[in-house]
Image: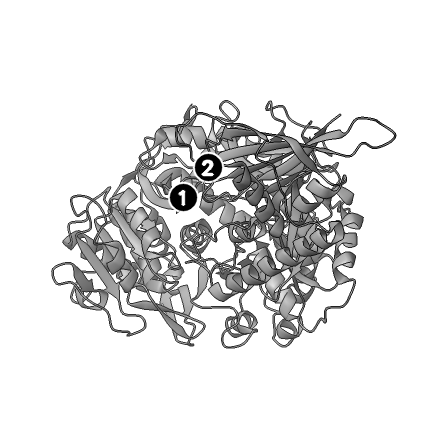
Amino acid sequence: MTEKHNEGLLEEKRFFFPPTEFSAKAIIQNPNIHELGADRATFWNEQGRRLDWFKPWNTVLEWNPPFAKWYVGGKLNAAYNCLDRHLAGPRRNKAALIFEGELGDRRVLTYQDLYREVSQFANVLKSLDVEKGDRVTIYMPLIPETVIAMLACARIGAVHCVVFGGFSAEALKDRIQNSLSKVVVTTDGSYRRGNSIPLKANVDLALPVTCINNCVESVIVVKRTGQPVDMLEGRDVWYHEVMKNVSIVCPAEPMDAEDMLFILYTSGTTGKPKGVVHTVGGYMVGVSTTHEWVFDLKEEDVYWCTADVGWITGHSYLVYGPLSNGATILMYEGAPDFPEKDRYWKIIEDYRVTILYTAPTAIRTFMKWGESYPLGRDLSSLRLLGSVGEPINPEAWMWYNKFIGGEHCPIVDTWWQTETGMIMMTPVPGITPLKPGSCTIPFPGVHIEIVDHAGNPVPKGEGGYLVVREPWPAMLKTVYGDDKRYQDTYWSEIADVYFTGDEAKWDEDGYFWVVGRVDDVINVSGHRIGTAEVEGALVDHLLVAEAACVGRTHEVKGQAVFAFVSLKEGIEIYDGLIAELKAHVVQKIGALARPDDIFLTAELPKTRSGKIMRRLLKDIAEGRTIGDTTTLADAEVINFLKKNIDAQKVLDARNASLKFRRNKVSIPDTAVFNRCSDESYEGYSYTIWFATPAQDGSRHPNTHFYFFQWVERLKLVEQVALAITNIMVNNKAAVEAIFAYGTPDFSHAVINEGSITDDLSEEGQICFFGSED
């Protein structure tokens, strides 16, 4: 069957133009700025001058696909550009970092304060024999010491590896082991919704089996919660003790533009951590330029990026981009609903925040809670809003615009990745008309296209794969310790072109719409449907607050849409609501996107950073063993879903069995059983050919087959029959597939066994059926 990209999904015709007053004061007012960026080498050569260099570069770019070197020969230091260069003028006493803890504690660090503490901690690291190029793992909550640790590493040329504080001890161990870190910086614990969460204890669990040659020599512990911890003599030291009487003078190490700045681990398709490497020169130019232009940064702004530093957004647009531009950044440690659901809006009111950069998932959560919370606070200080992390659906965009921005704040909907390091597609707020749900067009100096399988650009109005045609300054340089994985993952799909792994479309106006990850695309009867599009259609319904869609195996269509829907607070469920929601998707997208299943739930499983864990939802939809839940904000949500959806599947299958008055398959021992070789495999496939009564006047019965995969080998015919019966217990479609054409006749059945090379232990059973005329 031919694979087709779905066209015309969620068409958006509305334009929102920047307010005249905003445009008149915008940093970028030149409408031809994108044309100027078409000469990418010249453009980025010019942007490089925004930083302070110890030695200027000789060549702006050396490109030997897939390896790029930017600002070749230049020397600089990231921490120097974030701190030292601001001390000679009035920024010295300007607030660099405003911190509010979840329990209400507050700190303000000026640029002079931050410089002093970073220099001191850099000297602490040097006293522990940390040298240029050594790796330091930072496993901490969102507190000032985390930023201090990052900048201290950058100051002396050490490579920091920040691990999100919500990751488990096992995940931490893998990252320490892969990076061979010499030092770990952590806290005793962190706060989340008023509870104290242990972090040092996870470090202790991670270290005993970590690394041959005992790579971790020291653990530095920040006292945050005061909870008791075990301190290993000779290895563990308290942050506040080692910082006493340490010199505040620590010269910044001159770094080659291509020296490593940090490693940030992302999820991969294998169990091995994937360490994305970013280097000093190009990365700093990219994040500094995009931060100033995209957020229209002014000297008086109070800028709040809600991301955790454990993610790339926190690296680029909480730390390095803003501080290199002399911004005042706000950091909040805790949950958005502690102690009340207006915590974010209270923070904006209290600190007169002017720029807010947050995630669509958070926005949809705020929608669900209702507009009464933001309307109860003074948000008039806001002048610009941003969105990051995933595509934002038009309904959430409009809510964000109306209730948070007061319909006077431009919204910069940004697309980029851990690997890109910097924002790649975005409005330039003073000049770009906005479309709800679109990240508009590529940033100046960035060459992005949408292509087909062969790498050919698709015409406007069509969709395909999102690729970057030419190198950009903040691009990843490799996967740490694995150049081959870097090439295979990002550059092998289309020669010398960076494959983002995302699907997108562009409309007749040339605006880009990111559909979702290629692996988040559901293939329904050969049509590729982005999960984000179906979710957007569901959230467009008046009663829906949030939706998450996954694909599940379907016997006929290959895959079907399974939707998890959370309604707005106060909405009562009524008969016909599910059908109404399905019809709404059909109206917005088309019949092929109609969800087969919609499950209503009060909450969706999310990480502590607010991202919906679709991987776990797919496990539930497929009936698989639930994967790792250590990063969940509330594990009880997934337990509730699993329990209730399992029950619903059984009920649906039982009803189907009652309809056909059959719930069991019986295959006689005389059936032909064609076995594969006797060697052991990781899984097995079984195809059962059977007959059903003749139809339409034919004298010959119809022949059908049913196919399924099984982890364990089925040695007897009766075991095959039992396996099919068990599948039908939880699978309505399986019942319909076998009994829909009349009573199946297995008297002359043929069973063909095959091997499965993929590991099915986490994939579950896959089933489909067909007929032979």
What's the residue type where badge 2 is placed? Arg
**Residue 616 or 217: which is nearer the viewer?**
616
Q: Residue furthest right?
A: 697
- How crowded is the residue under tag 1: few (<14 C-alpha within 10 Å), some, or many (20+)? many
Q: Which mark is residue 284?
A: 1
Is residue 107 left or right of 649 when viewed as pictured?
Answer: left
Residue nearest the observer in this picture, 700 or 481: 700
> In which quadrant will I find the N terminus?
top right
Spot occupied by residue 57 in the image (x, y as percentages of width and height): 35, 32
Front residue (pair 209, 24): 209
| Residue 262 image label | none
What's the residue type where badge 1 is placed? Met
SS type, badge 1 = helix
When the figure is inspected, residue 268 is found, relative to residue 83, above or below; the finding is above
Q: CA distance from mark 1 to mark 2?
A: 55 Å
Query: Does the image show residue 766?
Result: yes
- Residue 119 percent location from the top left of the image: 25, 57
Q: Position of residue 70 (x, y in %)?
A: 40, 32
Q: Which residue is mark 2?
A: 713
Badge 2 element: loop
Tag in front: 1 or 2? 2
Quadrant, the C terminus: top right
Mark toward the start of the polypeptide (1 vs 2): 1
